[in-house]
Amino acid sequence: MKKVLYTLLLLLPLTAGASGGGIELESADIDLSDSASLERGAKHYVTYCLGCHSAKHIRYKRIALDLKLDEGEILKNVAPLGAGIYDQMHSAMNGHDAEKWFGTTPPDLSLIARSRGADWLYSYLKGFYSEPGKPTGVNNAIFKDVAMPNVFWQLQGTQTAVTKIVDGQEVITDLKLVEAGQLSPEEFDKLVNDLVNFLVYVGEPVQLERQQMGKYVLFFILMFIALAYLLKKEYWKDVH
Ligand code: HEC
């Protein structure tokens, strides 16, 4: 046991070092009870991401059920034209084209919030900065040399990297907006946050149900304690 503890202690500085140096992750504001945010997020996903990334683990039907939306509404407002209510969120792009264009296939994003975390996603989507030498014209402060273009360049505007030299290596310390986009920085943050909120929901749709269920379970436990207490009083009242 001691050995395990010592090993863990030894590893501590390593994990601390891994997070130091570069740019810090920003916190996403995740609220799965905010159905309006989730609906906006779903819409943004279809508009800006579905062209390249599928989210095969979720169907439009399930989104409609969970967000308490009308099926017609979800097909009209969220799903791409021609999609059916029982369809999964399929991307129109095929792997062969993707290989040709990006040198890699854009991954399915159903579980991305669980593997990367909400803050990572939020920072990644806000982390594109101009680097003219790149095939896409951008690089990313969180995912260096990523093959994905900045799909939000018109909305967000153009960012450049602020760097400094640490131990002879150039590290990014901040990103600066040098050319405004169609949205203000606050509006853009909200759009990205809604999108990440949706991806967190897609990672585990049953979360919504579970949180609802939790309230009933707690209520039941409290009622049960009260009943058990009354029963105990009844049983013991003559034993004295
Ligand atoms: C034009 C195609 C395209 C669009 C549109 C697009 N992406 Fe990507 N994305 C890619 C490619 C290609 C990669 C793989 C990059 C790599 O591995 O270098 C990628 C990678 C990613 C990753 C990293 C996955 C990992 O390896 O952990 C995330 C997260 C991501 N995209 C999210 C999004 C989101 C969210 C949207 C919508 C706002 C979006 N992408 C829109 C092409 C696209």
Image (cartoon, rainbow, N blue to C red):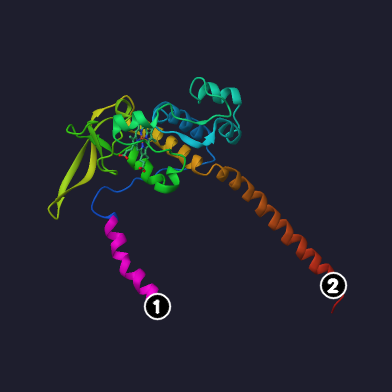
Q: Is residue 233 depicted above or below 67 in this figure?
A: below
Q: Residues within 10 Å of mark 1 (few under 14, many from 20)?
A: few
Q: Is residue 224 depicted above or below 4 in this figure?
A: above
Judged from the image, the secondary structure of the residue bearing numbered disc 2 is loop
Report the magenta residues as a range: 2-18
| Outermost front residue | 96
Relative placement, left or right, of 167 versus 140 is left
Q: Which quadrant holds the N terminus?
A: bottom left
Between the C-alphas of marks 1 and 2, the distance is 52 Å
Rendering quarter of residue 129: top left
Type of secondary structure dominating the magenta stretch:
helix
Q: Look at label 2 and name its amino acid.
A: Lys
**Residue pointed to by mark 1:** 2
Residue plotted at (30% across, 60% down) = 16
Q: Along the polypeptide, which appears first: circle 1 or circle 2? A: 1
| Outermost right residue | 238
Q: Is residue 150 visible?
A: no
Relative placement, left or right, of 162 versus 222 is left
